[in-house]
Image (spheres, helix red, strand yellow):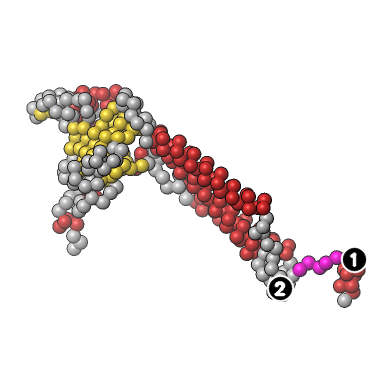
């Protein structure tokens, strides 16, 4: 009683406690500890996976092998970071309101209202517009690069999809039979699309039957391959500036196209420029052992440059269409 009288006389107001006798400082400390534990848990989860910072901010995307892939991955990364930042802001404000501004026992009045707070409403209107405008700007910048028209100095590749394989042609080349150098996939052999790493490449694609999709995961995008692209008003020519490193990269059809859609794999074999030039020269000559123009596998074997010149695919394998081999006994 004396304590209450002395507080009243001093003009002080005792700290408000909840029904369990906890004051606001204690509740604040509990929330702070919970936040610290959440941050610590996130850091531990990140480092325990063995991922680097670059791995983490790729959000599961493969490492791109073209400049266009890097631009698209960067756009995606910063879009995701911006979305997470806004998300954490909203989640944090929601948690704060639930923790510190919930209705308490004995409250009879409405809390302070903000619906006519002009500065706050301006911020909540202008800020989202700025975020959308920035995302739109960078999206257009990347899209203009990815969808640019060829300039004419690119290596030209014609891509033909059919149920259920691929044909790749090199326009402007001729084998001893007078035909354009080409690689056609079969049930027994995955087609190899051999490309250089030191020059721009343009792809022209069309389908012989249904809609397919040309997808190389390390290019970080896919392109629909449609029959009669001109009649269907489809832009079927696209360009990459270069492939940034030699290697083998699996390619797939990413559009369901019938019973054996899953067997429509191919492999991109990226060679250094000098090896690619040798490869293309060999493809335009006759194999003395067979009396026929060199195939892709035979030409790669002749280059003899190790695994990079493997005559068969190293990232995928042929698909056996016999249904009996997939039965479980």
Most foreground residue, 275 or 68: 68
Q: Which residues are magenta?
A: 11-16
Please give the name of the residue rendered at 88% of the width and 69% of the height, measured from the top-left corner: 8
Q: Which residue is mark 1?
A: 10
Around disc 2, counting alpha carbons within 10 Å, would you say few (fewer than 14), some (14 to 19), or many (20 or more)? Answer: few
Q: Which mark is residue 108?
A: 2
**Residue 13 part of the magenta segment:** yes
Report if residue 104 is visible in the image: yes
Nearer to us in this view, 258 or 18: 258
Quadrant assignment, res 325: bottom left
Quarter of the picture holding the C terminus: bottom left
> Total label count?
2
Residue placed at 18% from the left, 32% from the top? Answer: 182
**Between marks 2 and 1 in the image, the one whose residue lies nearer the viewer:** 2
Residue for point 29% across, 27% down: 155
Residue 280 percent location from the top left of the image: 22, 26
Q: Would you identify the image quadrant in which residue 174 lies?
A: top left
Percent position (x, y) of residue 179?
A: 14, 28
Q: Residue furthest bottom?
A: 1
Note whether 244 is above or below 2 in the view shown: above
In the rendered image, residue 202, in percent from the top left (x then y), is placed at 30, 31
Please tell me whether mark 1 sits on a helix, a strand or a loop. helix
């Amino acid at each position: 009683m004396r304590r209450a009288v002395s507080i009243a006389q001093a003009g002080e107001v005792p700290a408000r406690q909840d029904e369990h006798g906890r004051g606001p400082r204690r509740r604040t400390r509990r929330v702070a500890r919970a936040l610290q534990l959440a941050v610590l848990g996130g850091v531990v989860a990140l480092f325990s996976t063995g991922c680097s910072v670059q791995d983490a901010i790729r959000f599961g995307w493969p490492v791109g092998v073209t400049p266009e892939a890097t631009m698209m991955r960067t756009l995606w990364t910063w879009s995701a970071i911006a979305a997470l930042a806004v998300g954490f802001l909203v989640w944090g404000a929601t948690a704060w309101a639930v923790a510190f501004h919930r209705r308490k026992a004995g409250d009879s009045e409405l809390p302070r209202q903000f619906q006519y707070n002009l500065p706050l409403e301006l911020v909540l209107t202008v800020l989202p517009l700025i975020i959308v405008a920035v995302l739109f700007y960078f999206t257009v910048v990347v899209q203009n690069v990815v969808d640019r028209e060829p300039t004419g100095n690119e290596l030209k590749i014609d891509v033909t999809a059919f149920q259920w394989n691929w044909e790749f042609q090199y326009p402007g080349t001729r084998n001893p039979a007078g035909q354009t150098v080409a690689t056609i996939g079969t049930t027994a052999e995955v087609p190899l699309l051999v490309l250089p790493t030191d020059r721009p490449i343009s792809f022209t694609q069309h389908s012989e039957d249904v809609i397919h999709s040309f997808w190389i995961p390390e290019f970080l995008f896919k392109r629909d391959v449609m029959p009669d692209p001109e009649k269907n008003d489809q832009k079927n020519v696209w360009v990459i500036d270069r492939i940034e490193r030699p290697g083998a990269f699996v390619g797939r059809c990413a559009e369901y196209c019938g019973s054996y859609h899953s067997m429509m794999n191919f492999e991109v074999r990226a060679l250094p420029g000098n090896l690619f030039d040798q490869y293309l020269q060999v493809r335009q000559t006759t194999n003395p052992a067979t009396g026929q123009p060199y195939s892709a596998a035979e030409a790669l074997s002749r280059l003899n440059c190790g695994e990079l010149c493997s005559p068969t695919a190293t990232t995928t394998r042929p698909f056996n269409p016999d249904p009996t081999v997939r039965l479980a006994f």
